[in-house]
Amino acid sequence: MIYRLSLSYLLMACLLTTSISFADNIPTISGKHFQTHCPYISELAKNSNHIWITRSKWQSFDPSFSEKLTHFRGAQWQGQHIGKLICIYTDDTSYTFPVAVAAPFLSYKPTDPKWKQHSQNANTYNCAANQVTDCTLIGIQKDKTDLNSPKKIEQFLQGLKYKPHSSAP
């Protein structure tokens, strides 16, 4: 229940900060569209808070006891026409929970036949696979106003530079 509320809140926050238009009653988002899939296991690293992350800003929701992820189990997409992608990974132990890693971008509803609509929730699609490349979909990168744009990153880094205070008026 908490997981579902968190995902819904995250999706709503993303939609509220994104420019959306409608064409033929299907929403489209201005920005760059790209074919994508879940991160390869080799791209995932665990930070000091035990959260799995990638350099491209994917991250898990909860701390994990898994020391090394070894298996991709599939992906889940939730939304209507636009939604969020979650990727599921496990390790070789029997005592850890699977790790759910969230995409840092919105995506369109999957159209690849490997994605199957959930039997009890029409807004959820599952892709059961062992290879990340089996679960592709179209991601959406917002325009250059994106928080992770090179300009925004440069502004952030400039803001971190030490600026001594002048005692002179």
Image (cartoon, rainbow, N blue to C red):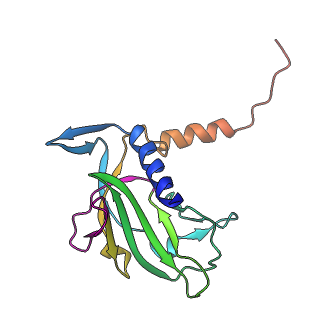
Q: Can residue 39 be seen in this view?
A: no
Residue occupying image coordinates x 49% and y 42%: 147
The C terminus lies in which quarter of the figure? Answer: top right
- Give coordinates of residue 157: x percent, y percent: 62, 42
Q: Can residue 72 be seen in this view?
A: yes
Point out the stretch of residues depicted in magenta: 104-124
Q: Does the magenta stretch include residue 75?
A: no
Decide whether the magenta segment is chiefly helix, strand or loop.
loop
Residue placed most toward the observer, 12 or 4: 4
- Give coordinates of residue 161: x percent, y percent: 70, 38
- Give coordinates of residue 122: x percent, y percent: 27, 61
Residue extending farthest left = 24
Residue extending farthest top = 169
* Relative to 34, residue 19 above or below: above
Horizontally, residue 27 falls left or right of residue 7, namely left
Residue placed most toward the observer, 153 or 78: 78
Q: Give the number of callouts.
A: 0
Residue occupying image coordinates x 82% and y 22%: 166
Residue extending farthest right = 167
Horizontally, residue 136 falls left or right of residue 155, namely left
Residue occupying image coordinates x 43% and y 64%: 86
